[in-house]
Amino acid sequence: MAKFNNDNISPLTPRMGNIVTRFIGDLILKCIGWKVTGQLPNVEKIVIIGAPHTSNWDFVIAMASMLSVGLRFSWMMKKQAFFFPLGGLWKAMGGVPVERRGKTDIVAQMTNWFNSNETAWLGIMPEGTRRKVKQLRRGYLRIAYAANVPVFIIGLNGPTKEVVLDKIFELSGDMDADNAAIKAYLDSTFIGVRPELG
């Protein structure tokens, strides 16, 4: 797959940073031997899934890639973590506070979040752990279905050291079938940083 080209990025893509932060992201990736390939989709709202998640390095690689591409995506974090002075930092980095206590409905919270933003890209690690899993947690699909937004796959491929901006996965309307198909696709397409855990 071709190396990512910032010149081809869609005007709909939420952006952050500048030439300096993109340089920093590029430099980090170069130092650890990784690169970003593929292209981002031309959509205003989307759920992004990143997999396989097998190493603590995944976070460093993902953050460096985000800086390199200049992409602003959001991620969920428990509301209680947004206290002064860190709350402002989490929000600036894309954090979305969610209430996880009691019987609160995270899907409803995130659907409201999607509906209240003109552009909204939400990143989720669907495995929920660095250990090998037989199936993905379905929260990302419940949010995508409820908010009526597509699912975009970003793969970490350890052997080639690529962060692959892959594709929108066409949803069928059957959540269980989609979850199994996405897991099968990830397993057959990408190998994590620590293959024994992928």
Image: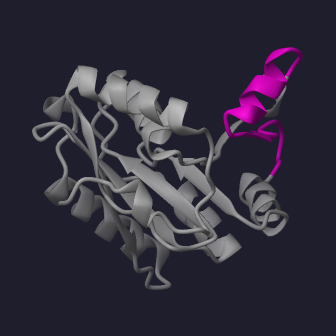
Asked if residue 112 is positioned above or below residue 4 in the image, the reply reads: below
Q: Is residue 43 left or right of residue 147?
A: left
Q: Which residue sits at x=53%, y=30%? A: 20
- Name the image colouring: one colour
Residue 142 position within the rendered picture, expressed as x and y whole percent measured from the top left: 60, 65
Residue 147 position within the rendered picture, expressed as x and y whole percent measured from the top left: 69, 71
Give the extent of the magenta segment.
83-104
- From the image, which quarter does the C terminus lie in? top left
Q: Is residue 113 left or right of residue 142?
A: right
Q: Is residue 158 left or right of residue 90?
A: left
- From the image, which quarter does the N terminus lie in? bottom left
Q: Which residue sits at x=37%, y=75%? A: 177
State the residue in front, 191 or 160: 160
Q: Looking at the image, can residue 23 be seen?
A: yes
Q: Which residue sits at x=74%, y=57%? A: 110
Asked if residue 110 is positioned above or below residue 63 in the image, the reply reads: below
State the residue in front, 20 or 159: 20
Residue 5 position within the rendered picture, expressed as x and y whole percent measured from the top left: 35, 56
